[in-house]
């Protein structure tokens, strides 16, 4: 059955004329055309919307990428500024430490120079004192030739006492500095020895007595017969033993004076005669802690005491120098400790800078990856599943960018 037969059948069935049938067919064709037109416009609108969405997403991605690049540039600028600040601070610290070390070195050098100058001055004074002692020794040797005249001078007891006292004071004053001795000072028991010498290290003073029983000795020298010499010798022994006991009883005070005292004999010849002919008196004096000394022995003892006092002063100065050196070492240790702490701070800051640089490198790599991505502009032609995959990937990219921030 062909179309002509169908047309005839429709005319017979519905009673339509050929013109009516042609109108119906035209109307049907018009409806189909309208449907196709609407569908085409809808598809065009959908494609336009998809293109706009893709362009919007591309613009958002470009803006995000530009923000990342801007943040990266700011980060590099801040890192450069921090590096400059750290460099300046480190140079200032090095300059400050160098200045302080130079000042400390200058002070140490000045102190050592002053101490050296003081030591040289003390040595010069010592040489002057030694010259004085040599001159005094020469004077003693010349005085040994005047023993006969000395006996005439010492014939009177008061004159003898004044001469012995003057001789002893001269020796002590020539050998010791002022303040290291005292004449006629009063002890706690009311006694006044002829001289007291201050001993080093806070020890009690040494007592010197210049009263010698010269009358009994002159009686020995004036005796003509052996009986007179024996009697004069006994009297001299008795007088000097009494005088030695008086010295031990009056001047040897425990805790206040030394446990030994000097009995000054103003003549070397008398001193030699006593040690040669009266050895028992010397031994008894030693037992009572009284030492008989001549002018030369007293001068030698004064020299020893002077050397000890000088050594004490030198030790005191050395102690002061040692104390200053200890303070200097403490300052150096404190400076070393603070420098190490500052070095720890610098190391921590360097570690933080390294971590910042690592983060900047990561941001740079992330930016490079984002820049390498290719966004598809023809997404409208993709299937619906492909569009959803692109949207999900774009959302994941946004989440990653937020996490990196």
Image (tube, rainbow, N blue to C red):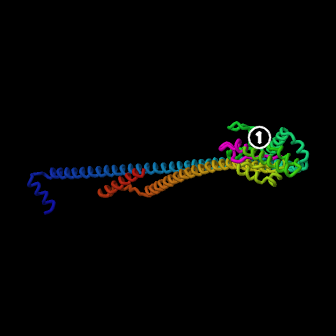
The residue lying toward the viewer, choosing from 222 and 94, is 222
Numbered range of the magenta stretch? 246-266
The residue at the point 90 percent across, 43 percent down is 152
- Answer left or right for 233 relative to 106: right
The residue lying toward the viewer, choosing from 320 and 183, is 183
- Answer left or right for 384 relative to 26: right
The residue lying toward the viewer, choosing from 297 and 276, is 276
Q: Is residue 48 magenta?
A: no
Q: Is residue 225 visible?
A: yes
- Answer left or right for 401 relative to 117: left
Q: Residue furthest bottom?
A: 1
Rendering coords of residue 33 (x, y %)? 24, 52
The residue at the point 38 percent across, 50 percent down is 57
The residue lying toward the viewer, choosing from 79 and 176, is 176
Q: Is residue 260 magenta?
A: yes
Rendering coords of residue 21 (x, y %)? 15, 52
The local crowd at label 1, few if under 14, some if 14 to 19, many if 20 or more residues have their Cα within 10 Å, is some
In the structure shown, which secondary structural element does the residue marked by tag 1 occupy? loop
The residue beneath circle 1 is 194
Rendering coords of residue 133 (x, y %)? 83, 49
């Amino acid at each position: 059955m062909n179309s002509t037969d169908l047309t005839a059948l429709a005319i017979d069935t519905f009673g339509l004329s050929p013109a009516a049938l042609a109108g119906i067919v035209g109307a049907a064709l018009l409806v189909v055309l309208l449907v196709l037109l609407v569908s085409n416009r809808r598809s065009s609108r959908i494609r336009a919307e998809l293109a706009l969405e893709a362009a919007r997403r591309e613009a958002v991605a470009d803006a995000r990428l530009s923000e990342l690049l801007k943040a990266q540039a700011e980060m590099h600028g801040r890192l450069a500024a921090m590096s400059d600040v750290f460099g300046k601070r480190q140079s200032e610290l090095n300059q400050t430490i160098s200045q302080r070390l130079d000042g400390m070195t200058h002070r140490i050098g000045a102190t050592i120079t002053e101490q050296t100058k003081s030591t040289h001055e003390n040595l010069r004074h010592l040489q002057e004192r030694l010259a004085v002692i040599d001159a005094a020794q020469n004077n003693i040797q010349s005085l040994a030739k005047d023993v006969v005249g000395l006996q005439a001078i010492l014939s009177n007891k008061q004159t003898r006492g004044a001469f012995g006292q003057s001789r002893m004071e001269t020796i002590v004053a020539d050998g010791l500095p002022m303040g290291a001795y005292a004449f006629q000072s009063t002890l706690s028991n009311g006694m006044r020895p002829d001289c007291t010498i201050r001993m080093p290290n806070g020890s009690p003073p040494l007592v010197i007595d210049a009263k010698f029983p010269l009358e009994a000795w002159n009686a020995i020298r004036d005796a003509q017969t052996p009986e007179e010499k024996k009697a004069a010798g006994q009297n001299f022994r008795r007088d000097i033993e009494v005088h030695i006991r008086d010295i031990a009883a009056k001047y040897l005070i425990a805790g206040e004076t030394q446990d030994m005292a000097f009995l000054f004999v103003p003549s070397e010849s008398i001193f030699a005669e006593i040690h040669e002919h009266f050895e028992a008196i010397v031994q008894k004096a030693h037992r009572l802690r009284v030492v008989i000394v001549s002018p030369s022995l007293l001068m030698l003892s004064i020299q020893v005491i002077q050397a000890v006092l000088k050594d004490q002063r030198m030790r005191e100065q050395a102690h002061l120098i040692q104390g200053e050196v200890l303070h200097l070492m403490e300052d150096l240790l404190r400076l070393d400790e603070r420098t190490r702490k500052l070095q720890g701070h610098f190391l921590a800051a360097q570690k933080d800078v390294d971590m910042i640089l690592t983060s900047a490198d990561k941001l740079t790599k992330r930016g490079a990856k984002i820049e390498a991505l290719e966004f598809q502009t023809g997404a409208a032609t993709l299937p619906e599943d492909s569009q959803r995959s692109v949207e999900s990937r774009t959302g994941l990219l946004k989440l990653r960018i937020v996490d990196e921030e």
